[in-house]
């Protein structure tokens, strides 16, 4: 696989999951970005450097609230009837009952991991959550069959009675298990929960176990405790698997990543932030501005993928390809950002990539931008100016470290000057009126009143000079019958 193909796959895989009938599902996008961000925070050791602290105005994640997602908290039949309505409707034309499909899916997943998923083997009071996890596992296993082309064979074959459903479901489960992409992430999270039950629910409170475990890692600025959650999760996973997979089945080969161990979607995750300097000032990640969220998600996604590509070197698998050189392409990078955030964007990207301590030999970043704030951090030799998508004459001025206002005055950015069109029109009219030989007192007073609102010192000074000249003319002709200046 070429570097360009890898780049395409990363970009395509990232957006494909959100599309349904050509539309991007913003809710799904936000959920996945949140998962990536959380897994990034938990899985990387930054030697006491807080990931993304500088990105969100000196704020840091310090704890996480986990609660039941009420949308999924229903009885088995009601849940699946609502979630799989289209599938139910199609099953009317099949000889196979849905109940049989449900049981077979659970059976095939159980066989794969040598564990009877249909029974709650843990000695705790999680029967409701266990059933909820099973329902969700069945739902997601079926949903991928009409959501993604690579699994569509199952949906058509089952509805059309082309093959016996046990064999069909067996093939489906095998394929899903081999797929470690974002497409099957939620399924892996549900399986992790069913195997480990590492999320404990107290019906009258928030889910405590993972929340407290993550809190311990995050409350000390991540630092030396950054791997606490990961180590405990793996240990919990190992103990549970040894207990359940007594015949040495496939469960012993289950190697969840941190993101696989995060709560599946039938739980809600809310990250809590606090000001690094004022620890009493706390608030939720969901209350951040769209710009702060965009900045966090953008840089978090870059770091997430870079870390994944670099981790191939650590795996040492014979069929793995380790990429020494990486291209990152960011288009319209300044979207959602006010000028101050645009000004800090490049340094945020560079500083946070440095924290990864990658073994990669080189990283090339291609930015497509309209922002002079971004351009002022880029050397002139690294800038390609485009006009209508075509290279245009190179700008003679140096961009790196250039004054933002000098860049704004360049006709490449603002062909009609560095002010708004509306104010430009009003200023032009004011100068035209003051240069008229005859001006009514009403017009004169209107121009005079408007001058106090002009923000550009030079323009304001020139207008005031013209007004003083008109005042003299007005004083000379104040007894004029027509009251013309």
Image (tube, rainbow, N blue to C red):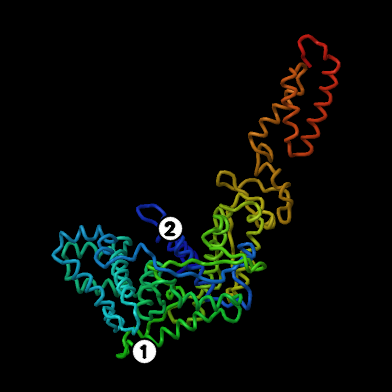
Q: Is residue 281 left or right of residue 201?
A: right
Q: State the residue position of label 2.
A: 27
Residue 386: where, in percent of width, then height?
60, 48
Image height of 364 relative to 200, above or below: above
Relative side of 334 to 124, left or right: right
| Residue 66 vs residue 480, the one in the foreground | 66
The quadrant the N terminus occupies is bottom left
Q: How many marks?
A: 2
Identify the element where label 2 is drawn: helix
Asked which secondary structure carries label 1, the reply is helix
Q: Position of residue 293 (x, y in %)?
A: 54, 59
Q: Residues within 10 Å of mark 2 (few under 14, many from 20)?
A: few
The label shown at residue 191 is: none
Residue 211: give x, y in percent of width and height: 48, 74
Q: Earlier in the sequence, mark 1 or mark 2?
A: 2
In the rendered view, does 271 fall on the left or right side of 198? right
298 vs 464, nearest the viewer: 464
Where 401 falls versus 172 (above or below)? above
**How many angstroms separate mark 1 from mark 2 (CA)?**
37 Å
Location of residue 410 (image quadrant):
top right
Which label belongs to residue 242?
1
| Quadrant (top left/top right/bottom left/bottom right) for the C terminus | top right
């Amino acid at each position: 696989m070429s570097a360009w193909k890898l780049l395409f796959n990363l970009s395509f895989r990232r957006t494909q999951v959100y599309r349904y009938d050509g539309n991007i599902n913003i809710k799904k996008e936000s959920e996945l970005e949140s998962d990536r961000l959380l897994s990034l925070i938990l899985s990387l050791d930054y030697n006491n450097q807080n990931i993304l602290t500088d990105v969100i105005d000196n704020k840091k994640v310090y704890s996480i609230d986990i609660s039941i997602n009420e949308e999924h908290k229903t009885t088995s039949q009601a849940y699946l009837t609502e979630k799989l309505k289209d599938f139910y409707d199609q099953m009317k034309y099949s000889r196979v009952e849905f109940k049989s499909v449900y049981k077979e899916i659970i059976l095939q997943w159980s066989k794969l991991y040598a564990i009877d998923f249909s029974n709650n083997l843990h000695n705790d009071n999680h029967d409701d959550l266990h059933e909820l996890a099973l329902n969700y596992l069945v739902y997601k296993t079926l949903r991928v069959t009409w959501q993604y082309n690579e699994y569509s064979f199952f949906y058509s074959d089952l509805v059309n009675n082309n093959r016996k459903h046990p064999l069909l479901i067996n093939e489906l489960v095998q394929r899903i298990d081999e797929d470690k992409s974002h497409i099957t992430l939620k399924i892996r999270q549900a399986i992790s929960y069913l195997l480990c039950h590492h999320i404990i629910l107290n019906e009258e409170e928030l889910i405590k176990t993972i929340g407290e475990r993550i809190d311990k890692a995050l409350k000390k600025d991540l630092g030396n405790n950054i791997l606490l959650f990961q180590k405990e999760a793996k240990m919990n996973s190992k103990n549970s698997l040894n207990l359940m997979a007594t015949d040495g089945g496939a469960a012993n080969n289950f190697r969840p990543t941190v993101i696989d161990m995060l709560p599946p979607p039938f739980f809600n995750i809310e990250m809590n932030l606090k000001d690094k300097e004022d620890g009493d000032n706390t608030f939720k990640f969901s209350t951040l501005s769209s710009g702060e969220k965009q900045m966090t998600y953008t840089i978090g996604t870059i770091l997430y993928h870079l870390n994944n590509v670099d981790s191939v070197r650590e795996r040492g698998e014979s069929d793995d390809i380790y990429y020494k050189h990486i291209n990152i392409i960011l288009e319209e990078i300044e979207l959602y950002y006010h000028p101050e955030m645009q000004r800090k964007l490049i340094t945020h990207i560079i500083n946070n990539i440095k924290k990864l301590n990658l073994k990669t030999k080189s990283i090339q970043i291609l930015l497509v931008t309209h922002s002079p704030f971004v351009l002022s951090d880029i050397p002139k030799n690294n800038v390609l100016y485009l006009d209508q998508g075509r290279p245009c004459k190179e700008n003679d001025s140096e961009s790196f470290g250039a004054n933002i206002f000098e860049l704004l005055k360049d006709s490449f950015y603002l062909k009609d000057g560095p002010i708004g069109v509306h104010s430009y029109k009003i200023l032009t009219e004011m100068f035209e009126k003051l240069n008229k030989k005859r001006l009514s007192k009403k017009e004169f007073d209107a121009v005079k009143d408007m001058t106090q609102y002009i923000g550009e010192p030079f323009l304001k000074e020139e207008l005031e000079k013209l007004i003083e000249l008109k005042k003299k003319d007005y004083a000379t002709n104040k007894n004029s019958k027509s009251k013309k200046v």
